[in-house]
Structures are given as C-alpha cells and as structure tokens.
Image: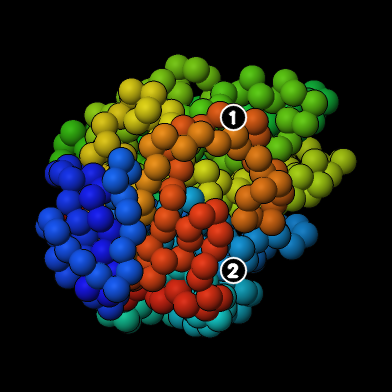
Amino acid sequence: MDLVVKNGTVVTSGSMAVSDVGVEGEKIAVIGPGLTGKREIDARGKYVFPGGIDVHVHLTPSYIPGADAPKRVDDFLSGSAAAVAGGITTIGNMTFQRPGETLREGVARDMEDARRNAVCDYVLHPVLTDPSERNLAQLPDLAADGHTSLKIFLLFEHFDARVADYIKAIQTAGRHGTISMLHCEDGALIRCVCQELLAKGLGAPRYYPNSRPVFTESASVERAVAIVRATGAPAYIVHLSSRAALDAARRGRADGLPVYVETRPIYLYLTRERFEEPDAAKYVGNPPLREVIDLQSIWHGLHHGDIQCLCSDHVGWSLEQKLEPGLNITTVRPGMADLETLMPMLYSEGVHGGRISLSRFVEVTSTNTAKLFGMYPQKGTIAVGSDADLVVWDPAALRKIEGSKMRSNAGYSVYEGRQVQGWPACTISRGEVVFENGEITARRGRGKWVRRGRTMAL
Ligand SMILES: [Zn+2]
C-alpha cells in the first residue's frame, strides 16, 4: 500500500469498527486488519471519518446588481486551506456570473480560479441571476458536463419579477438530474419590514433579526415546497434557521417530495441575544440568528433526519469590514468564516455533547451531501474504490477557538473563546496528506474539480 491508516475506529453512515484503511494512489484499496504500507499513520484511539463535504461556500465575488461591497478576504487558496485544517476535503462554491456573462462563462472563470488555487477538491454551483432563455438552454449541457446543481435566491427582487422563468429553470434542472439550491427568504416581505423599521429609526445593525422575521423565511420555504410539488424537481433548501421553516419543509418531505434541508452551524450555537452586544454586526448572516426554540428545533431536526446536511455558508469578511461604521439593516454584510470550525464544533457540541450519534455526524457532514450532489460513492464514504478522502479525528484534542490562528483571512471567529473537544489530527485528500500536526502540507492548486452525476434521492 502507498499509505495505511492503522487501527483507527472507521466510521461511516452505516458502520463503525476498528480497522486499517489501505490506500493505493488516490483510492481506498483495502479495508481490513494487518495492512502495511510505505507510509503508516497511527490512528489508535482516534476516529477515521470520510472527509467532510461542505457544498456551500463563497470564495469568489458575488456580482449581485447594486451590491457595492468591498472585496472579501477569502479566496480558493485560503478557503480551501481552512477546509482541510477542519477536516473538509471537498467544497462547493457559489459561482455568480458577472454582468453579461452566461452561466457557462461564469463557471469557466471560477473553474480556472479554483484550478490554480484550491488545495482540496471542489465543485461549482452556477447561481442563476438571469433566467433568460439562453441561460435555461445551457442547463442540459451543464448537467451533461457534470455540473448538477443550480443556485437560486428567492430573496432577490428579480425572483418575484420573473418567478415563472425561475420555476421553469427549477423544472428543467430537475429533468436533467440537477438539484436546485434555494435561498428561502421572501425578499418583498423583508423589504417591507425594513422600510417600516428604517422609518421608525430602528435601522442599526442590532435590529437585524427584527428585519428578517421567521415568517419571511417560512413563507418562502412554503413557496419552495409548492414549487417542488408542482414540478417534481428536487430542491435543497440552504441554511434553514427556524422551527416554522423546518415545519414547512417537513410537511413537504412527509408527502414524499424531494425536498432536502441544509442548516448552518451558527443556528446550532448562537441565538439572537448576540445582537445586544456592541459589535452586533459581526453576527449578521442570512437568515439572522433566531430564538432558543428555533435552535432546539434545528438540533432536533439534525438528530431525527429532517435536516440532512450541515454546511458552512463560509464568507470571508474581516472584522473591520463587518463592523464598518454607518452600515444599517439593509447594508450590513452577511456571512462569516466557518469552514475550519464546522466539523470540530459539531463534533464537540453534537457528538461529545450527546445530541447526535457518530453515524449521524458522518451523514450530515459528508455522506448525505455526496449523495444529493451526485458525488457518491466516489466521495462521502469509506469504501474500496472510493476516493481516499479521510480525516483522522482526535476525540480527546482540546482546543480553544481563536480566529486569529485560523486559516481564513477573516481573522476572527463568531465562536471566539469557545472550548472545543475533538479536532482533526490529519486530513487526507485523494491519498495525499494535506494537513497534519497543525500544518497545511498541500500544494496550492492540487485540488481537483469533481465531475458529478445526477442527484440521488435520500
Ligand atoms: Zn450562501
């Protein structure tokens, strides 16, 4: 064997046993006892998980009309370094078109950027911001080329203006095995609430949670479920944050609809009380932080399977950018760095904290995402013939979260100072050790694009 991970407890979504994992080239070749290799990694007393898959990151600029924001601080290099340092071996970037570009032109541009810079594997999700006939006509070719996902913001003004075209896009995508990733917040309702708050002088960032109440999310999720009902096309609801929204998705799933739910770490660990702090703006994400009852409901959904995936929605803003004076509820900068902390925080609070099982941890951080995004079983499991994407996990490692010591250029973490138990000891991507002893050992640009098949039902 080229590489053997020895005596670790190998965990997949359906099994757990002490074993060696033998790697030849980029693939897992044997799983069993007594293997020897040119390089051997001692995993005694540690877990071996499939490398994490975070399909929701922003490592390239978004060209949203009118969004006149400064350049964000993370790119494919720093973002993918943060990923592997946190046990994640595949990332999915939101790829916006520049004005005038088609979906395929935008994808080609980001493909080149990722090819030069990424240290882990990646996929790209074209973001549909113009459902023109020309863009819709490209959906079958994108799917045939292996880009089987499409991102749509129900939030944007042009969604309501052109809803029939967007529904047609979701329908066309579904016919070609492409899953539609839906940002479910009702833009028209949010704009109305914001105007009311601004008129009352309540525009400061601390009122951000008031500006996007739960009903603006649940109404949008209801609409997404109705679109799935009408078209039969699969939909993946990104960063779901509230109990009411989860209830809406659950009703769709109970009827057998292909509705899938992603949540995001911040909704598991933080609540809206954070907005009473002086630097409230650093907690801004879309949707906003919610109440304790919502947080409990998200944990319940993860535990019971109503929520299938946990992804970071990583956006690299520096603290200065987030806290820039003069920003209000309509101009604050949403998103935060969370790639490196996604798996450690979930392990610590979820598995170590007794809220979810080890197999559930593997499902929501890797296996389910691989299936929904057409990468299974190449990615998302530990099996003979799968890519040797592995994370050797030290369940006893104690760490304090310190944003300034992490790989994101953001330089801060919303979990600053939290004590975490469990951290990657070593991350392996396609048979290559890319992170060990706290250091990134990967070469810039070694990451590969993953050609994807059709979305799988869960
Ligand atoms: Zn996002």
Apparent side of residue 257 relative to residue 345 in the rendered image (left or right): left
Where does the image place residue 341, in percent across and percent down from the top left? 52, 43
User: Callout 1: 10 Å neighbours few (<14), some, many (20+)?
Assistant: few
Q: Is residue 161 visible?
A: no
Give the residue furthest to the top. Answer: 293
> SS at mark 2?
helix
Residue 360: mark: none
Please name the residue shown 55% across and 81% down the image: 116
Residue 418: mark: 1
- Which of the pair 437/384 is nearer the observer? 437
Circle 2: residue type: Leu
Apparent side of residue 56 relative to residue 3 in the rendered image (left or right): right
Give the residue furthest to the right. Answer: 325
User: Callout 2: 10 Å neighbours few (<14), some, many (20+)?
Assistant: many
Apparent side of residue 355 relative to residue 402 in the rendered image (left or right): left
Where does the image place residue 50, in percent across and percent down from the top left? 29, 54
Mark 1 or mark 2: whose residue is earlier in sequence: 2
- Callouts 1 and 2 close, C-beta under 8 Å: no
Q: Is residue 69 visible?
A: yes
Circle 1: residue type: Arg
> SS at mark 1?
loop
Q: Which part of the image, by quadrant, shows the N terminus?
A: bottom left
Relative to 303, is 402 above or below? below
Location of residue 32 (image quadrant): bottom left
Can you tell which of label 1 and label 2 is closer to the viewer? 1
Residue occupied by mark 2: 77
Please name the residue shown 56% across and 76% down the image: 444
